[in-house]
Image (tube, helix red, strand yellow):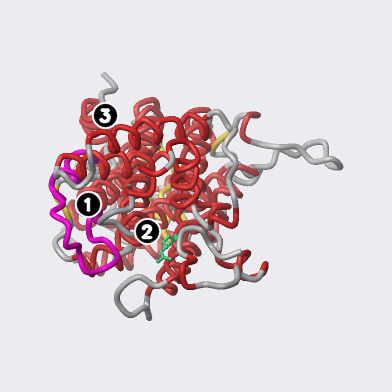
Amino acid sequence: AANAMWGGRFAAGPDAIMQAINASIGFDQRLYAQDIRGSRAHAAMLAAQGILTPKDAEAIGEGLLTVLSEIEAGDFPFRVELEDIHMNVEARLKDLIGEPAGRLHTARSRNDQVAVDFRLWVRDQCDAAITGIEALMQAFVAQAEAGAGWVMPGFTHLQTAQPVTWGHHMLAYVEMLARDRSRFADARARMNECPLGAAALAGTSFPIDRHMTAAALGFDRPTANSLDSVSDRDFALEFLSASAICAMHLSRFAEELVIWSSAQFRFVRLSDRWTTGSSIMPQKKNPDAAELLRAKLGRVLGAAVALFTVMKGLPLTYSKDMQEDKEQVFDAADTLMLGLAAMTGMVADMQANRDALAASAASGFSTATDLADWLVRELGLPFREAHHVTGTLVAMAEAQGCDLPDLTLADMQTVHPGIRPDVFAVLGVENSVRSRTSYGGTAPDNVRAQVARWKEHLGMT
Ligand code: ARG
């Protein structure tokens, strides 16, 4: 049989396979609350404008609440032949209230309906992402506070570079997450315009009040161009882009956790709650959650790439291709939220191995730069020459199988006669980090000041 919603000109119904490729109800039922909210706002506006009678609007509004409670109670009969959430809700409304249900779709199209539903959903997800990000920021700040002055090696190329502090390393992630948070906030502010009332694409001849529906749905204003309103998915792309960058940050820390928790590094101990054992090797404690977080970026970025690819060649305005937006965004949002929650738990539980961090910080000639700086400051050497002298001393230590502080003064003086005993002070890692007081540097006092700033900012005090 032809479709009850649009089948006027159709003699036959769709092929079963057409139905399978065309229907979105399997996934867009997640938009039910937004769909009903949008419809209620639309009906109230139609009544206020004299387009619907108060009686019909009342019946529609009440009926929609019944539909809402049926769906929430889990006894709503979703029907695939009704294609999507919009027509499932409307068809059920018709069962419940009869004729007035057919008046709800006045001055509206599924094109603006889906645009408003999806915007409402993505807007909520921006808020959820921000909340999840803040929880993770707090976990990193707590770690930074506990170990503001603990020394550890800082790396470039994953080779020992210079000593840094644990707190400084933790706060690097807080900075990244703060940018993530602001990206979601920016995206949210930009998407907060209401497309409802654009109708199919051209607007409508009915005297609707789009400002009223925009306000009722918590938008800052209605969108200004009806064509753009129904063809725009920038809000979804911005959400996916911000999600991908955030997931990339999670992936980078996950990678550090995988390295740090290895027997070769022993920088951190992950708690039993976030690790698994091996069925054959009894000693194993595998960082599975971290590994999965490292991998999950693939899904989130994949969703972004998928939707960019859907959108890139579409002429204005709506094309059915755009129905492919929702599964990508749902999956990315779910993945990001799970990832944030898992990372928050792991960070809160992880225990830094202070001794292993300190021992590692002192190895690998990590204070070579301090030595070169000393030669510049105390002996007046040009930095390039100081660099060369230090390199010779590193080679000497390497040949002797020791670290820089283990060289004798006499040995050092064979390389440069001006070297004095007070050079040894700068070869210690504690002194090294304490000296890095430039703004944004790793000195423990700097880190403590930043921790205090973040605690205040995140309401942790
Ligand atoms: N299920 C559709 C989607 O997700 C709703 C919009 C349908 N509009 C249309 N003209 N067929 O995009």
**Crowding near the residue tagged with mark 3, few <14, some 14–19, many ≥20 C-alpha atoms within 10 Å:** some
The residue under label 2 is 110
Task: Say which residue appears at 20% left-offset and 58% top-offset.
Answer: 376
149 vs 27, left or right, is left
Asked if disc 2 is less than 8 Å from ligand 1, the answer is yes
Q: Earlier in the sequence, mark 3 or mark 2?
A: 2
* Amino acid bearing label 1: Cys
170 or 412, which lies in front? 170
Q: Secondary structure at mark 3?
A: loop
- Whether residue 329 can be seen here: yes
The residue under label 3 is 458
- Predominant secondary structure, magenta span: loop
- Whole-percent x, y for residue 412 in the image: 38, 55
**Crowding near the residue tagged with mark 1, few <14, some 14–19, many ≥20 C-alpha atoms within 10 Å:** many
Q: For marks 1 and 3, give the one nearer the viewer.
A: 1
Q: In the rendered structure, does residue 201 fall within the stretch colored magenta?
A: yes
368 or 253, which lies in front? 253
Q: Secondary structure at mark 2?
A: helix
Task: Say which residue appears at 55% left-offset and 48% top-offset.
Answer: 293
- Please identify the residue farthest to the right as the structure is shown: 280
The residue under label 1 is 194
6 or 110, which lies in front? 6
Task: Say which residue appears at 71% left-offset and 37% top-offset.
Answer: 276
Task: Say which residue appears at 38% left-offset and 27% top-offset.
Answer: 142
* Amino acid bearing label 2: Arg
